[in-house]
Image (tube, grey):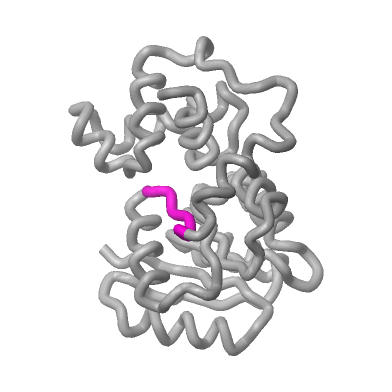
Amino acid sequence: MTTRVLIVDDHPLLRRGVSQLLAMEPGLESVGEASNGADALQMVRELAPDLVLLDLNMRGMSGVETLKALRDEGSDACVVVLTVSDSDEDISASLRAGANGYLLKDMEPEALVAHLRRAAQGETVISEALASTLARALTQGRRHDAPRIENLTAREREILRHLARGESNKTIARKLGITEGTTKVHVKNLLKKMQLRSRLEAAVWAVQHGL
């Protein structure tokens, strides 16, 4: 199956470069480009892309504001942030807004493609250079109503442990002997119960708490 990608960035050169890169990769297709958040929201409604590659620093709506709007509208598209920022604050804000990944623009083209393929399979992706800052970013500013694993069913706890390993829905479904659709429902339910907005945030929480 082909993964349909929407590229959102206010730099035309970057949009064109990523679009040309995807054109050379089987299974990945650029279905549109947006230069701002408002256009991105409209294009997501019209095109229903599988994956949105989203810049953070744009004129008008920021990337985080765009991401929040997408999730508030009910979009379940995979959203991967592609940015120059490696700040704890931006990482935390992006993941709590519902990002499925956080990548830096200085990575090699081949690495970007590999990460996008993994993200399209339901895995969480983050630049290797950010691994040491991820847990700190998510720990800082933690809400007072911290997630409680006691609210989860036994099956949801089991799936949370698989999320902590960075596994995709397909992989989790195969290991547990359930359908991928059922896995998606469990993930959605456990995120809601724990008041988390992304599977990556859930995964980091699980690792921090020894799961």
| Image quadrant assignment for residue 3 | bottom left
Task: Judge whether residue 84 can be spotted in this image.
Answer: yes
Q: Is residue 193 above or below residue 111?
A: above
| Image quadrant assignment for residue 66 | bottom right
Residue drawn at point x = 47 percent, y = 15 percent: 152
Instruction: Please provide percent x and percent y for residue 44.
Output: 56, 62
Q: Which residues are magenta?
A: 123-128
Q: Residue furthest front?
A: 132
Q: Is residue 121 above or below residue 34?
A: above
Q: Quadrant of the C terminus?
A: top left
Instruction: Please provide percent x and percent y for residue 183.
Output: 34, 32
Q: How many marks?
A: 0
Residue 132 or residue 71, whichever sits in front: 132
Instruction: Please provide percent x and percent y for residue 139.
Output: 64, 35
Q: Is residue 202 above or below residue 147?
A: below
Q: Is residue 63 above or below residue 19?
A: above
Residue 176 shown left or right of residue 141 in the figure: left
Q: Residue furthest top?
A: 150
Question: Within the magenta stretch, is there residue 122?
Answer: no
Residue drawn at point x = 32 percent, y = 41 percent: 167
Residue 55 shown left or right of residue 28 in the figure: right
Instruction: Please provide percent x and percent y for residue 199.
Output: 48, 39
Task: Judge whether residue 68 can be spotted in this image.
Answer: no
Residue drawn at point x = 56 percent, y = 66 percent: 82
Residue drawn at point x = 56 percent, y = 27 percent: 192
Q: Quadrant of the N terminus?
A: bottom left
Residue 125 or residue 133, whichever sits in front: 133
